[in-house]
Amino acid sequence: MPIHDQGYRRYGGDKARGRAWLVIVTTGVRAMLGNRKWIVLMVASWIQFLVRAILFYIAANFPQAASIAPTAATFRDFFEWQNIPVFIMTVWLGSALIADDRRANALQIYLSKPLTRAEYIFGKLAILVTFLLLITWLPAVLLLVVEVVFAGNFAFLRANAYLFPAITLFSLVQVVTVSTSMLALSSLSTNSRFVGILYTALIFFSNALYGVMRAVTGSSMVSWISFGNNLAQIGDLIFRLPLRYQTPWPIALVMIIALVGVSALVLERRVRGVEIVA
Amino acid sequence: MSEAEAVVSLENVTVLYGRSNRALSDVTTTFVRGAVGLLGPNGAGKSTMIKSLLGFVVPTQGRMRVLGLDVATSPVEIRARIGYMPENDAHIPGLNAVSFVGYCGELAGLPRADAIQRAHEVLFYVGLGEARYRNVDTYSTGMKQRIKLAQALVHDPDLLFLDEPTNGMDPKGRDEMLELVRDLAHNKGVSLILSSHLLPDVEYTCDHVVVMDKGRIATAGSIEALKQPRGRVYELRVKTPGDLETFFDRLRAAGLDCHSTDDDVVRVFVPGDGGARRLFELAAAERVQVRHLRPSVPTLEDVFAHAVGEP
């Protein structure tokens, strides 16, 4: 019988539990992969990988190019340059994740289904985290693999065995920090453009403030003021490189943890089925 | 009423917004299987009650059970078995109707293939078959109401909460929506709680009613039983040299119920066996001319007006 003749029928199948967050992730990822401009951004984000892979090949096959041979700092540099596509992707995707749902009153729909607020938040977070890891962790790990393949031996990997855990750890720190803070901002508004502007303004403002304070004090001890500087400081620590700022790394770590904590609190307050006006 | 017959029960439930706004005040009531209307004027607490049952709002005190499960301890299990049609516009942006309803089905635990199949079925059922590939953002108000019903039905709930389902619909759409609701409750075995301030909607679709006013239960029971007269109802039009309200106050002081209708006619309930004679006696005492008096049949509007004390 055609569907349009069947009317309303009772459903006799099984219903899964506890998978709602995965449905949110897969649907969100599928939706973005259907956007051509997004695919272009993803591809463009891998250009650095391509360039570095070529440099690794040259360094491995031409002794005259030994000066461009990869070191641990190369991988640290990779993440520095990936900050640009990470920023663009976070603003583009992250700003709308909850803001659009709030604008369309979708939270009532979501939270009337068998999923908790935590699952909703985790699902939304996982959409952004998935794409950000695809342009940070994955290409960095592949660069390691490429280096080994082009060198034809594991010497580099043996000498820098900490690189794989360092790449993984720093990717997670960066991606989780950026994603939770953007998601929290997205939950504060119904306008995704406003959220994007706010996020951008906070980053640039904090950097500008650091610049002014640095000029005034003559010291980089105030680097903790800047969102990006804290991540950079922790990145240097994880990759066992000299710290670029005078700020002790525990302070940078505390600032990152505080940022994630505040973001989590904001999300807990804002993601509800109803707006509670006290 | 036994727990087995009740799909929803509330026991001493109080909901406070802020410190002093009592949206629900020590509410104790049950909703039976079938179609139950939740009636009340704006601000009576209907939506707050539904949102409390869904777990959106946590009561200050009291206990609530839905389908035998405690709302405080099993909210997710409850939401797996209920469907909710919100009062205001709500959808997931950027999706067409099939994708939206299918997504809702997946969120409720249906496998993807089943969710899409059910999405098509319920969209045809609610009358959106031809428009199901259009983006929901482009839908008219009436279509958005239908799709809200569709997303509430896609996972085959045991209990539906419908909050003002005919909001913003044209007369034809409204009739079709009421037919759908009636069909679900009477032919498809889906229990539902229909929250509305529109008495004709409730009277047409429901067998039982819970009437709320100012955060409390004003009256509850089977509509037929509530409409059983314990006296007689009359339509009355009078002419008085003085203030009409003074005459109506006099009627109320004498134990009669009266409330105005839109047509310049007052509906008067005369308890007991007094009948029209009592009315004439009171009119004569106040030197009021009775211009029109006709016996009438009690309606849900009379029940509602009596329950909320409307003039």
Image (cartoon, coloured by chain):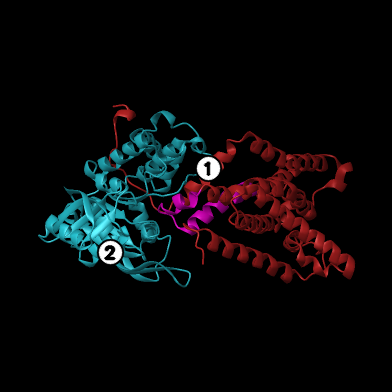
Q: Quadrant of residue B173?
A: top left
Tell me the colour chain B is drawn in.
cyan
Nearest-to-viewer mark from 2 and 1: 2
Numbered disc 2: secondary structure: helix
| Residue at the left extreme of this rendering | B273
Q: Which residue is mark 1?
A: B93
Q: What residue span does the magenta drawing correspond to? A: A105-132
Q: Are marks 2 and 1 on the same chain?
A: yes
Which numbered marker is on residue B249? Answer: 2
Amino acid marked by disc 1: Pro
Percent across and percent down for residue B180 are 30, 39
Who is closer to the viewer here, B94 or B62?
Answer: B62
Q: Is residue A60 visible to us here?
A: yes
Query: Is A120 included in the stretch rendered in magenta?
Result: yes
Percent across and percent down for residue B7 are 26, 57
Q: Quadrant of residue B220?
A: bottom left
In this image, B294 relative to B147: left or right? left
Q: Of callouts 2 and 1, which one flags the residue occurring earlier in the amino acid sequence?
A: 1
Residue at left offset 64%, top offset 38%? A38
A30 shown above or below A268: above
| Residue at the top extreme of this rendering | A2
Quick one: label 1, few (<14), some, or many (20+) residues within 10 Å? some
Protein chain holding label 2: B
In this image, B221 relative to B199: left or right? left
Tell me the quadrant of the picture where the N terminus of chain A can be found: top left
Protein chain holding label 1: B
Who is closer to the viewer here, A64 or B191?
Answer: B191
A237 shown above or below A190: below
Which numbered marker is on residue A112? Answer: none
The red-tinted chain is A
Query: Is A33 included in the stretch rendered in magenta?
Result: no
Amino acid marked by disc 2: Asp
